[in-house]
């Protein structure tokens, strides 16, 4: 096992700061369709069930693998040649998100709920599409054999994601509260205009991230040529060859590498692992509001302090994944994740307490940090570099599918429990057990080894 000092030096690599920016760009849209939209609808008087089911827009993250093959090959006129394949896609998606925020700024939820949800869906689609590209660009910053750097990169990506999510949340919540206190009735609409500045700044930083596509494009062309030679000439044959090379080959590569049964086991674990965290996360801001905490309290404890602790423990989680391996990190993170959910039960049973609120958020962020960096490292090590975007999107989407589609019923569950938040959080803690059982069954048959994770 390498030393702590040898592990930490990977964070000083210049590439890690570029990966950090990519993570920020990935995390920020979740503020918009998660915290901001949920609280906006809550303060407009909509029910918990409505807010929960509005979260179905997150479902697009679960199916973005369907168009990921296109992202691996899509070239945007002018932009691709000007700034690069991956960066051109990210720039277009960022522009759509910016336009969506401007549209939100002129709408009233009570009169235009359907339109607001539709715009939220547009943000989610753009965010899910840019995530495909961001994850691919992040992985491609690291060499194939740099296993330790991959774990460090995963940690920096998670730090970036939480930075985008937490800092974006701080800006959104404090802006909304200040504007509300000053008497602005449309304080959320003005806040969305303020948030467009974040998008502009991120796109300026994107220009400083390098991109190289030649090796990947060359390998894809070779694979497509082999398929075309086998199928033959003709328009239909060309279409079939394109479909096989774009869609079938990435899937075949994954199952060829892992085997069908182990491949299915990996996908099952990924689907189940973070469901409990998603149930808690989807309803957490509604729970805080019902417990009597102000937007300022939520911004301070959940976003501000939570951001700092998340960064610290994500970096520590990355070091742990480098030294001990992703599999061991996943087991430990899962146990911690389930345990910390119970702190919210304690908060509900004891009543409003800023101290207990801060403690619950602190430990929840620690658990989420360890779990996410281990999870990202795990799936990053599984992908084939020829089909980076497609395979990573497939694996990440399977995980998101469990978190978004099932967690959309979180509000309905709280209503079914007659508002018994204590029991709700106990159930979310239990939800992690099936995933850990699945991982334990397949842990010795996964193709990458723990030794490879912790060595270059």
Image: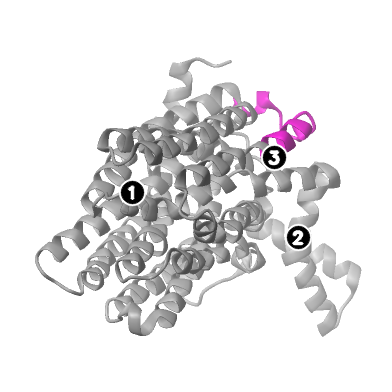
Residue at the location (44% across, 63% down)?
48
Looking at the rendering, the stretch of residues picked out in magenta corresponds to: 435-456
Q: Quadrant of residue 71?
A: bottom right
Q: Position of residue 361 (x, y in %)?
A: 37, 38
- Counting residues from the start of the chain, the first of labels 2 and 1 encountered is 1
In the picture of the structure, the residue carrying the numbered disc 1 is 166
Residue drawn where x is 41% and y is 60% of the image: 34
Disc 2: which residue: 222
Image vertical order of residue 401 relative to residue 88, above or below: above
Residue 200 rendering spot, x and y as whole percentages: 29, 64
Q: Earlier in the sequence, mark 3 or mark 2?
A: 2
Q: Is residue 51 visible?
A: yes
Q: Which residue is depicted at the point 34% across and 80% down? A: 110
Cβ–Cβ below 8 Å for labels 2 and 1?
A: no
- Residue 448 counted in the magenta span: yes
Tell me, for residue 304, which label it has, or none: none
Cα separation between marks 3 and 2: 41 Å
- Can residue 18 be seen by looking at this rendering? no
Q: Which residue lies most toward the front here? A: 418
Side of 119 where 301 appears, left or right = left
For label 1, count other residues whose C-alpha is less than 10 Å away and answer few (under 14), some (14-19) or many (20+). many
To which residue does mark 3 refer? 434
Q: At numbered mark 2, what does the secondary structure look like: helix, strand or loop?
A: helix
């Amino acid at each position: 096992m390498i030393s702590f000092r040898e592990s930490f030096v990977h964070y000083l690599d210049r590439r890690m700061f570029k990966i950090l920016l990519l993570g920020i760009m990935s995390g920020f849209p979740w503020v918009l369709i998660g915290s901001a939209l949920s609280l906006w609808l809550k303060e407009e008087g909509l029910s918990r069930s409505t807010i929960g089911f509005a979260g179905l827009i997150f479902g697009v993250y679960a199916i973005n693998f369907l168009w990921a093959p296109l992202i691996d090959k899509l070239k945007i006129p002018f932009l691709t040649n000007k700034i690069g394949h991956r960066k051109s896609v990210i720039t277009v998606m960022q522009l759509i998100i910016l336009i969506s925020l401007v549209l939100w700024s002129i709408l009233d939820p009570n009169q235009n709920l359907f339109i607001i949800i539709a715009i939220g869906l547009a943000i989610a689609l753009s965010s899910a599409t840019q995530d495909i590209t961001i994850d691919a660009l992040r992985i491609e910053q690291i060499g194939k054999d740099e296993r330790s750097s991959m774990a460090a990169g995963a940690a920096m990506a998670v730090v970036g994601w939480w930075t985008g999510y937490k800092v974006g949340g701080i800006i959104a919540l404090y802006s909304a509260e200040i504007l509300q206190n000053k008497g602005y009735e449309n304080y959320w609409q003005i806040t969305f205009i303020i948030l467009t500045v974040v998008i502009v700044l991120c796109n300026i930083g994107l220009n400083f991230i390098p991109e190289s596509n030649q090796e990947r494009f060359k390998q894809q062309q070779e694979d497509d040529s082999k398929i075309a030679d086998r199928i033959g000439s003709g328009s239909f044959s060309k279409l079939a060859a394109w479909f096989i090379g774009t869609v079938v080959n990435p899937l075949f590569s994954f199952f060829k590498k892992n085997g069908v049964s182990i491949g299915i086991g990996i996908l099952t674990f990924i689907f189940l692992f973070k469901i409990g965290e998603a149930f808690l996360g989807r309803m957490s801001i509604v729970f805080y509001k019902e417990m009597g905490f102000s937007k300022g309290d939520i911004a301070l404890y959940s976003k501000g302090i939570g951001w700092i602790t998340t960064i610290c423990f994500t970096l520590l989680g990355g070091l742990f994944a480098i030294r001990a391996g992703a599999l061991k990190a996943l087991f430990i993170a899962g146990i911690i994740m389930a345990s910390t959910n119970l702190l919210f039960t304690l908060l509900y049973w004891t009543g409003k307490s800023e101290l207990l609120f801060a403690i619950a958020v602190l430990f929840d962020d620690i658990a989420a940090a360890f779990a996410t960096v281990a999870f990202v490292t795990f799936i990053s090590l599984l992908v084939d570099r020829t089909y980076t975007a497609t395979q990573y999107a497939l694996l990440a989407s399977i995980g998101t599918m469990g978190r978004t589609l099932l967690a959309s019923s979180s509000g309905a569950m709280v209503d079914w429990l007659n508002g018994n938040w204590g029991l709700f959080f106990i159930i979310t803690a239990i939800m992690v057990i099936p995933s850990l059982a699945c991982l334990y069954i397949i842990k010795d048959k996964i193709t990458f080894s723990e030794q490879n994770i912790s060595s270059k």
